[in-house]
């Protein structure tokens, strides 16, 4: 049995607490969109499902395995939907993040990151008793820590050597360093070499499609050189994993990757919306923040109830989803802790007190980490509520 850890919002114990002091859920299945309490995280299920189908179909056509990154959604219900369509498993970025997914029945999880110490290695080894797990290394000193944890847990873990393909963050710099790590991994019976991780996060957000293509080509070239060098020494890389939403069209065509790790494609966001896309490569915006006008006292602007505690703004302020009868576009111009400021070029376009607006978050991943649940909408009606069960699991 897995160690007790983070209890989901829906499973919170309510013993010794008066029923009228429990925060109600923001909606229930059947609730009208206009009646959803705010701020809340909304998912357009039709657009979301088209995104899932489109990515899986593209991976299938290329003969490349799809292992979506769950750090984007932190939601087991979404992971199950991805696996049901053909994903081979998921990626997580932290060992703790994997726990709710294993509890939900996801049986193949790659930690696409290095671990920062023995406690995390022991946690991952414990998880490896219940699911297939793999993890990255880029330093020889990380290998015996993983091996000790595997031995203590009487289990086996798969280890990937991460190579730096242009991100300048994690990963070894050349094939010789990668080969030395492969040799280190082979010395431990509780570890097995799984292949290479080659991820270039910076390439995902180059605005021009041609820039992303060129960055992806350079990353594939570097990866191919490492594969060739390892093969010359008798080391075969059964799996080469990496890539992301912004580079996926090029990663699939590279002939280098056997597995891709896109995450944000399920939602998209304002940052990805600023990228230039090929018509056949685009995914739909499916994630929104529902907010409500709480003050119109300023008259030339309105104040909504979604501020810094409701969204990540590292990639800019959110956009406002336009409606068909809009007089003029609305602009979210400032975020305070609990307030957001909305302006319009025409004051007549400003919404009234109590009006609901839908915002497009600038960066979906950290925005998800601020919410207990995702509210799935079908048209104008709530269909489901999905716990963001890995919220806050950053150890």
Image (spheres, rainbow, N blue to C red):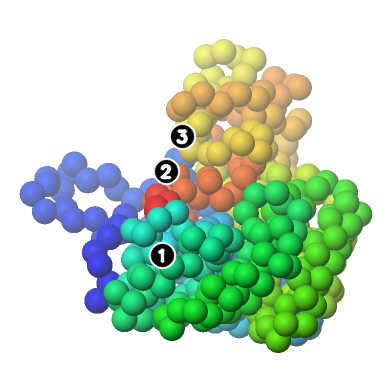
Residue at image mark 3: 309
User: Do labels 1 and 2 touch, CB within 8 Å?
Assistant: no
Looking at the figure, which quarter contains the N terminus?
Answer: bottom left
Residue bearing mark 1: 145
| Mark closer to the chain start, 3 or 1 | 1
In the image, is residue 259 above or below residue 71?
below
Marks 1 and 2, the one that precedes in the sequence: 2
Q: Residue at x 29, y 48 (%)?
A: 24
- Residue extending farthest to the right is 210
Height in image: 211 above or below 80? above
Whole-angstrom CA distance, mark 1 to mark 2, is 47 Å
Is residue 51 among what the camera can see? Answer: no
Q: Earlier in the sequence, mark 2 or mark 3?
A: 2
Q: Position of residue 259 (x, y in %)?
A: 68, 76
Q: Residue at x 48, y 38 (%)?
A: 310
Judging depth in this view, the residue of 326 and 256 nearest the camera is 256
Q: Position of residue 183 (x, y in %)?
A: 58, 76
Answer left or right for 345 relative to 208.
left
Q: Nearer the viewer, mark 2 or mark 3?
A: 3
In the rendered image, residue 233, in percent from the top left (x then y), is placed at: 72, 82
Report the residue at 61% width, 36% height from top.
314
- Residue 340 placement, left or right of 259: left
Label 2 Cα crowd, 10 Å radius (few <14 / some 14-19 / many 20+): some
Q: Secondary structure at mark 2?
A: loop
Q: Nearer the viewer, residue 2 or 319?
A: 2
Q: Nearer the viewer, mark 3 or mark 1?
A: 1
Identity of the residue drawn at 59% across and 69% down: 181
Q: Which residue is mark 2?
A: 37
Q: Secondary structure at mark 3?
A: helix
| Alpha carbon distance from label 2 to label 3 | 16 Å
How many residues crowd around disc 1 within 10 Å: few (fewer than 14), some, or many (20 or more)?
A: some
The reply, left or right, for residue 273 in relation to residue 79 is right
């Amino acid at each position: 049995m897995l160690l007790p850890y983070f209890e989901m919002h829906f499973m919170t114990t309510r013993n010794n607490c008066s029923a009228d002091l429990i925060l109600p859920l923001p909606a229930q299945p059947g609730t009208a969109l206009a009646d959803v309490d705010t701020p809340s995280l909304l998912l357009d299920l039709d657009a979301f499902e088209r995104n899932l189908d489109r990515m899986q179909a593209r991976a299938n056509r290329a003969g490349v395995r799809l292992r979506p990154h769950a750090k984007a959604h932190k939601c087991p219900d979404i992971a199950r939907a991805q696996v049901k369509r053909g994903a081979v498993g998921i990626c997580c970025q932290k060992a703790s993040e994997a726990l709710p997914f294993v509890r939900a029945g996801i049986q193949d999880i790659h930690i696409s990151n290095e671990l920062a110490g023995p406690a995390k290695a022991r946690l991952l080894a414990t998880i490896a008793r219940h699911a297939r797990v793999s993890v990255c290394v880029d330093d020889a000193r990380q290998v015996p820590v993983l091996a000790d944890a595997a031995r203590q847990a009487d289990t086996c873990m798969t280890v990937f050597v991460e190579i730096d393909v242009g991100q300048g963050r994690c990963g070894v710099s050349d094939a010789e360093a990668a080969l030395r790590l492969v040799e280190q991994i082979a010395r431990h019976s509780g570890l097995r070499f799984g292949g290479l991780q080659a991820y270039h996060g910076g390439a995902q957000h180059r605005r021009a499609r041609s820039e992303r293509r060129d960055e992806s080509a350079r990353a594939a070239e570097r990866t191919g050189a490492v594969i060739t060098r390892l093969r010359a020494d008798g080391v075969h890389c059964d799996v080469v994993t990496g890539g992301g939403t912004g580079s996926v069209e090029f990663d699939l065509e590279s002939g280098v990757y056997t597995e891709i790790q896109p995450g944000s494609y399920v939602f998209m966001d304002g940052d990805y919306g600023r990228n230039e896309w090929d018509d056949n490569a685009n995914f739909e915006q499916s994630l929104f923040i529902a907010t409500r006008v709480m003050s119109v006292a300023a008259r030339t602007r309105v104040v909504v109830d979604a501020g810094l505690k409701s969204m990540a703004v590292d990639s800019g302020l959110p956009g406002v989803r336009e409606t068909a009868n809009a007089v003029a576009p609305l602009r979210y111009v400032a975020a305070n802790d609990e307030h957001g400021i909305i302006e319009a070029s025409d004051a007549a376009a400003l919404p009234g007190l109590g009006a609901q607006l839908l915002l497009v978050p600038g960066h979906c991943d950290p925005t998800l980490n601020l919410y207990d649940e995702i509210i799935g909408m079908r048209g104008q009606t709530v269909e489901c509520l999905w716990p963001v069960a890995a919220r806050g699991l950053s150890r």
